[in-house]
Amino acid sequence: MSTLSEPPVVTHGLTKRFRGGQVAVNAIDLEVPAGSVFGFLGPNGSGKTTTIRMLLGLIAPTAGSVELLGESMPKAQLRVLPRVGALVEGPAFYPFWSGQANLLRFDAADRTADPRTRKARAGEALERVGLSNAARKKVRAYSLGMRQRLAIAVALMQRRELLVLDEPTNGLDPQGTREVRHLLRELAADGTTIFTSTHLLAEVEQVCTHAAVMSLGRLVRQSTVADLRAELRPRLVVRTPDLGQAAETLKSLGVTDLKTTAETVEGDAGELPIEKFAAALVAADVRIHGFGLERPSLEEAFVALTGEGFDVAQ
């Protein structure tokens, strides 16, 4: 049994090589803190889903090891998986059955589930995902967001210590995305550790406490989201109509990596106090409409780490 502080997910040198020699996952070492919302981030094709399949024992690793909830996988999967909720590929619902009827069907297929509490647990799961009012509505009438929440309800039919979700907002409209994000925050607040893969930076910025970045099958970084955002230095940004004079003044003070847009000049200010730049710009008769240090976006930090772009859709 795992303890409260023990990392629920740990891998050592986890590797998957497919026939033909393609290395989908290359010797990754993951450690997911207990109680975290852990974003497993990377462009499509970076190895995220393959990793999740190995975590859950759906495919065997070529090399390395996996521990879930303190136990070795897949050896202990009969003991471990009942304590893990997973959404890897959305379950196939019967469209002409109600949401509640679909939940009861999935629970009946679970040999570890207690049939005596099945109906009560279905009601609790539907309430947790905000579908109580739609419990008797046919699934064919559900929106995409409602179907995704119903899929998460399947994973919540029993109390779970860990939820593993592969792209839980994939294909959802903005409202459905907001619904699922809100649900993940609530589940985490209740003490469930959530491991969620995504190719959307907004997922990580708005929901996750920790993140790991995958690129071409390799794990290039894992840390708190706050630390990832702080990877790059703040940049000095000056909003002014006098772009040329501002750029020249900042360059003379040692600002590097200068970039000019239609309204701003920005660059790496180095160690010089910010007030020195303001005074120099005023002395050079530069009209200042905005001035300050701005933290780099999470997108810039990830591009710096991987050299690849990410889908930043909301």
Image (cartoon, grey):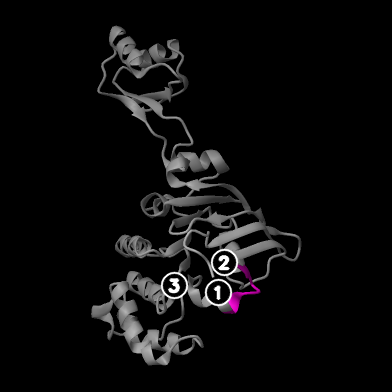
Q: Which image quadrant for residue 170?
A: bottom left
Q: Is residue 18 left or right of residue 67?
A: right
Q: Which amino acid is tagged 2?
A: Leu
Residue nearer the viewer, 16 or 263: 16
Q: State the mark number for residue 121.
A: none
Query: Does label 1 or label 3 sit earlier along the sequence?
Result: 1
Residue at 40 percent of width and 79 percent of height? 157
- Label 3 to label 2: alpha-carbon separation: 12 Å
- Label 2 to label 1: alpha-carbon separation: 7 Å
In magenta segment, residue 230:
no
Q: Is residue 15 above or below residue 274?
A: below
- The residue that disc 3 covers is 160
Where does the image place residue 254, in percent across and percent down from the top left?
46, 14
- The residue that disc 2 covers is 68
- Cβ–Cβ below 8 Å for labels 2 and 1? yes
Query: Does label 2 or label 1 sit earlier along the sequence?
Result: 2
Q: State the mark number for residue 80.
A: 1
Residue nearer the viewer, 92 or 31: 31
Q: Is residue 151 above or below residue 48?
A: below
Query: Residues in magenta?
Result: 70-78
Residue that extends furthest to the top in the rendered view of this protein: 283
